[in-house]
Image (cartoon, helix red, strand yellow):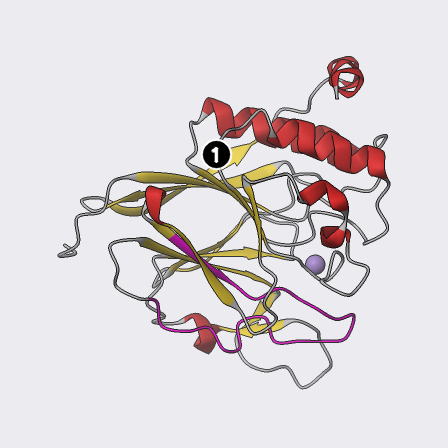
Amino acid sequence: MSPQNRPARRLLHTSDLHLLTLHDHGCRAFAAVIDLALKERADLLLIAGDFFDQNRIADNVLDFVKAQISRLHVPVVILPGNHDCLVEDTVYNKRHWLDCPEVLIFRDNQGETLHLDNLNISVWGKPIDTYFDVRPLAGMPVPAVNGNWNIAAAHGLVVKQMPHYTRSYIITEEEIDGAKWDYIALGHTTIFEHVWSNPVTYYSGSATEKGTLALVDFNEETGVKVTRCEITKIPLNRLSEERSDA
Ligand SMILES: [Mn+2]
């Protein structure tokens, strides 16, 4: 057992919502993700890339996102992926994020660790900041032993070894194996998947396309346990009520 005495915490890990307009499934799925986070009493919501389908997102979608997040009252950590990458005109530079204190966005293209000390959680992430290829886990540091649960987030494709053919956003098993993080939250593929055991590493799958998420319990006595969750699609009439409230 770890000599640390960290309180039990619960993370809801999602990715690849690909929000685009108010009329597609992404917004319905995101409202259902918020419902699930509330029902499961998650301490933190982590979006591991491709929250948005592209960087040109209309204001009404961002207003909707803010209204949904405001229901939650826990931190929301966002890693920009390849679709919503952190270029100059990124969706994450829009004014909507300025008065969202509960939203934390990774903005350092070398990677950075966000410390949520009131939750005893630290989260490392390196945003994709270009439309060209990058290595999402390159430069992942060794986490500090500081009494926090240490979570890393990355958006990319895990492969056994570097492929001979051209693939993008490659993460090798070697980069994951034995890393000292308590949990690695992955995004980019649409299917929920247990990727690695040491450290515990999962793809949540796309909440929009497959309806799956990873609910992660951190507990000093029982370790890191992941439960596959599915969202219930919000009926369209309820969503339109929420839109008129927003
Ligand atoms: Mn992607």
Q: Give the range drawn in magenta.
A: 122-143
Q: Along the horizontal axis of the image, is 146 left or right of 157?
A: left
What is the x, y in percent for residue 232?
62, 24
What residue appears at the point 74 percent right and 56 percent down from the top-left corner?
84
What is the x, y in percent for residue 77?
54, 48
- What secondary structure do most residues of the magenta stretch adopt? loop
Q: Along the horizontal axis of the image, is 56 left or right of 147?
A: right
Disc tally is: 1
Considering only vertical position in the picture, is 163 above or below 194?
A: below
Q: Quadrant of the N terminus?
A: bottom left
The image quadrant that residue 33 belongs to is: top right
The image quadrant that residue 128 belongs to is: bottom right
What kind of element bears circle 1? loop
Considering only vertical position in the picture, is 160 above or below 115?
A: below
- The residue pinned by badge 1 equals 74
What residue appears at the point 63 percent right and 36 percent down from the top-left corner?
211
Q: Quadrant of the C terminus?
A: top right
Q: Label 1 is placed on what type of residue?
A: Val
The question of residue 49 being in magenta is answered with no
